[in-house]
Image (cartoon, rainbow, N blue to C red):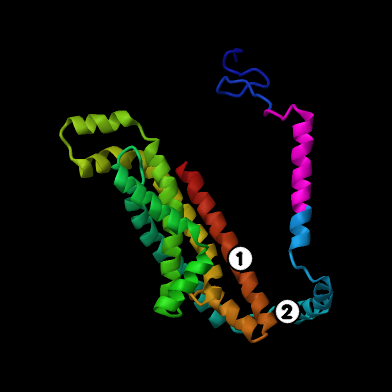
Amino acid sequence: MSSAATPPVGRPPSGRLWHKPAAIKNPWLRWGLIAAVVAYAYWAYTFMPINWDRVAAGLPRAARIINTAFPPDFARWQLLYSGVLESIQMALVATLLGVALSVVVAVMAARNIAPVVIYWFGRAIIVLARSLHPVIVAIIFVKAVGFGPLAGILTLTVYSVGFVGKLLAEAIEEIDRGQLEAIVSTGAGFAKTVLYGVFPQVLPRLVGLSIYQTDSNLRASAIVGIAGAGGIGNTLSSAFRRFDYDFAFAILLVIIGLILVSEAVSGRIRSRLT
């Protein structure tokens, strides 16, 4: 093989030399930043009201809880099955709704194709969806529509819009402008321009984001369920309220197994698509 086919040692395949990240050369500035970080960490530690006597008193209680949790109790597997099935259903439905809404929001929030007013409105929706933690959103929807999977679906839908909408809007802003101009030159309207000029370029990214968000919603369904939004998290919360720690430990093991399987499946699908 010729030397032209193999890049030199230390040179990436792209041909660009690797550069060491820039460091702070001024020693006073470098040590000043380190001192500021240490001082802030010490201030945060002293400012937080940590009661070490209470922590020490809680260690024996934690030990009793751990001893009670072993061995895990899988006798009520029907509850485990129904909770896992409900979480999966919540994640899938929320992903479908969230991705569909994210496409609309992303088109609105893309600077290169949306008018200024629509752009800021779309960005406001994304910022609002990303500002609130899913547990807070779950509490709001539980108060609005009651306990159960509907609150969880709505929560995960908002969560999906905040993530998929933002990344998809950024992908739309990076598309090839030439294809859009070619379609516009044929007299196509906005809808056809988006359909034939934008979506074909961002479709692989949209598929990857949808798969990732399905996996993320499955994990989040266990969290929002603790707030009463259905799923396996609701089953876990009920077990803790009853001090049924052996069953709670069994639920935790099932959740961990579910997440591992979901991660493996989604990773395999993403690897085949790329």
Question: In the shown orientation, is residue 65 left or right of residue 205?
Answer: right
Residue 242 position (above or below residue 136): below
At 76% from the left edge and 55% from the top edge, which residue is drawn? 43
Which stretch appears magenta? 21-41
Badge 1 local density, few (<14 within 10 Å), some, or many (20+)? few
Q: Secondary structure at mark 1?
A: helix
**Residue 221 seen in the current view:** no
Residue 257 tag number: 1
Residue 274: image location, x then y, percent:
47, 41
Q: Which residue is mark 2?
A: 69
The residue sitting at the left extreme is 187
Task: Tell me: residue 95, above or below residue 78.
Answer: above
**Residue under the point 30% across and 46% down:** 117
Pick whichever of labels 2 and 1 is earlier in the sequence. Answer: 2
Residue 14 lies, in percent from the top left, at: 55, 23
Of residues 92 and 273, the one nearer the viewer is: 92
| Front: mark 2 or 1 | 2
Residue 145, picture quadrant: bottom left
The spot of residue 90 in percent (x, y) is 44, 69
Q: Main secondary structure of the magenta part?
A: helix
* Residue toward you, 254 or 212: 212
> Please, what is the three-letter code of the amino acid marked with disc 2?
Ala
The answer to which quarter of the image holds residue 226 is bottom right
How far apart marks 2 and 1 lie (CA) works out to: 18 Å
